[in-house]
Amino acid sequence: QVQLVESGGGLVQAGGSLRLSCAASGRTFSNYHMGWFRQAPGKEREFVGAISWSGGITTYGDSVKGRFTISRDNAKNTAYLQMNSLKPEDTAVYYCSAKSSGRLLGVKYDYDYWGQGTQVTVSS
């Protein structure tokens, strides 16, 4: 089992920045690709982006490309989501997730482990 805990959410004005963290425990962190998702009220969960087990490959959803950056520190068992140029439509609960490095990074919705989520609210 992998336990994931997100932190760093909060209220920010449009145009501002936030960095979310996802602390992992339970298994060897570098054995897992990490993903970030978000879910706004009344909407389906949306893929934000993902990072490979080594950190060498990242992929992003179209709505966040050029504004969000995913990174990881395997020595600290932590993944990050840096969010810049935030917009009110980025308001959502943000979740980190993990799947085995044996899976394809490009498959977006096959993650096995999920955090509890952290709220991000962007005011206009």
Image (cartoon, rainbow, N blue to C red):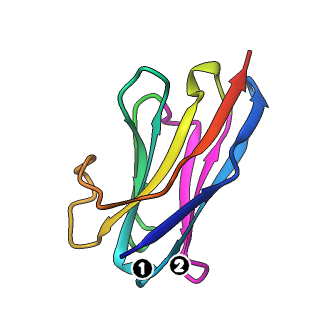
Q: Quadrant of the C terminus?
A: top right
Left or right: residue 21 versus residue 111 is: right
State the image coordinates of residue 106 (x, y, percent, origin top left).
25, 52
State the image coordinates of residue 34 (x, y, percent, origin top left).
41, 62
Q: Which residue reaches farthest top?
A: 124
Q: Is residue 16 visible?
A: no
Kindly state the secondary structure of the residue where label 1 is placed: helix
Residue behind mark 1 = 30
Pointer 2 with pointer 1, Cβ within 8 A: yes
Point 57% across, 20% down: residue: 89
The first of marks 2 and 1 along the sequence is 1
Left or right: residue 103 versus residue 124 is: left
Residue behind mark 2 = 74
State the image coordinates of residue 70 (x, y, percent, origin top left).
53, 54
* In the depicted structure, whether residue 90 falls above or below residue 101: above
Q: Which stretch appears magenta?
A: 64-84
* In the depicted structure, whether residue 72 falls above or below residue 39: below
User: Where on the picture, by quarter, is residue 68?
Assistant: top right
